[in-house]
Image (spheres, helix red, strand yellow):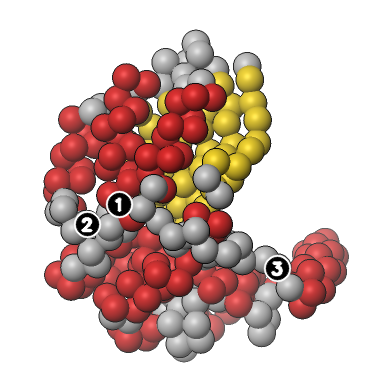
Amino acid sequence: MAKDISTVDGVKLIHVENADLGIVFAEVVIEAGSLFDPPGREGLADMTAHMLLRGTKTRTYQDVMDEVNNLGANIDASAQKEFMAISGDFMPRHLDRFASVVADVLGNPAFPEDEFDHERMLAVEDLKNVRNDDAELAGYFFARFLYKGHALGRPTRGYLGTLAALKASDCRDFYKAHVHKANLTVVLAGSIDRKGAEKFVRAITKGLPAGTAETATYADAMYELYVRMKIAQGKRAADEGRVVPHAEVKRRFAK
């Protein structure tokens, strides 16, 4: 099994070859997640990530999904605190065709208004369902307590009020600000050699601007130290039984 980390045309590449696997797993990581959501626009990175699949300048959402399905492949998009990602898997013989779809999704998203409205409706329903999920509720309040006053404490999916205020143009602006070669990491694992991995990276990023890498600040580093301290404090509180009862969590969430 061969593995390496390198740079291809300004894009970071993590490549792990396993010729016996018979499939290739791919992930395109865009280093801008919900931490980059402006105040009052919580949920923007999450909506932007999902909108990448909702149609391009040459393909509708259905075109994208049909083409991927016809290859026996999979594709998805999501957002986390630190990044957005397009992920999927495909058979090695379909590298060129799968790369063509990813290149279009990554480089030419159209952010159509009707698809935005549909995606927002789904996001709102998911957010409402959190009220009936104890594990989700616990995670929500734990993050808000642990990272109080910091963007890490805000939910990646946003709030009902902020989702209602978002527009398709907000997603377009977020995309333009953060999607460029210097801000990407491509991860490829499975039945793909070094030459194929480099070919895939060049194919999916050829239309993107070079950009400048976004680096962490001194304040970010200091806050990480602060967070580690808060985690230790939280563990001590749990060990000592100083926790918020479930009924109280639901009461607070209902406000």
For the residue marked with disc 2, what is the amino acid? Thr
Judge left or right: residue 43 versus residue 211: left
Any part of residue 247 in sight? no
Q: Which mark is residue 105?
A: 1
Q: Secondary structure at mark 1?
A: helix
Q: Around disc 2, counting alpha carbons within 10 Å, would you say few (fewer than 14), some (14 to 19), or many (20 or more)?
A: many
| Mark sitting earlier along the chain (1/3) | 1
Q: Around disc 3, counting alpha carbons within 10 Å, would you say few (fewer than 14), some (14 to 19), or many (20 or more)?
A: few
Label 2 close to label 3 by CB (< 8 Å): no
Judge left or right: residue 153 versus residue 40: right
For the residue marked with disc 3, what is the amino acid? Ala
* Nearer-the-camera pick, 138 or 244: 138
In the image, residue 84 lies at what x, y percent?
47, 58
Is 153 drawn above or below residue 39 in the view shown?
above
Q: Around disc 1, counting alpha carbons within 10 Å, would you say few (fewer than 14), some (14 to 19), or many (20 or more)?
A: many
Going 18% across and 30% down the picture, which residue do you hit? 70
Q: Secondary structure at mark 3?
A: loop
In the image, residue 122 lies at what x, y percent?
27, 65
Is 88 drawn above or below residue 103 in the view shown?
above
Viewport quadrant of the N terminus: top right
Going 33% across and 44% down the picture, which residue do you hit? 102
**Picture quadrant where residue 97 is located:** top left
* Nearer-the-camera pick, 109 or 231: 109
Distance (Cα) linking label 1 and label 2: 6 Å
Label 1 close to label 2 by CB (< 8 Å): yes
For the residue marked with disc 1, what is the amino acid? Val
| Mark sitting earlier along the chain (2/3) | 2
Distance (Cα) linking label 2 and label 3: 31 Å
Judge left or right: residue 23 versus residue 6: left
Q: Which residue is mark 2?
A: 56
Q: Which residue is mark 3?
A: 216
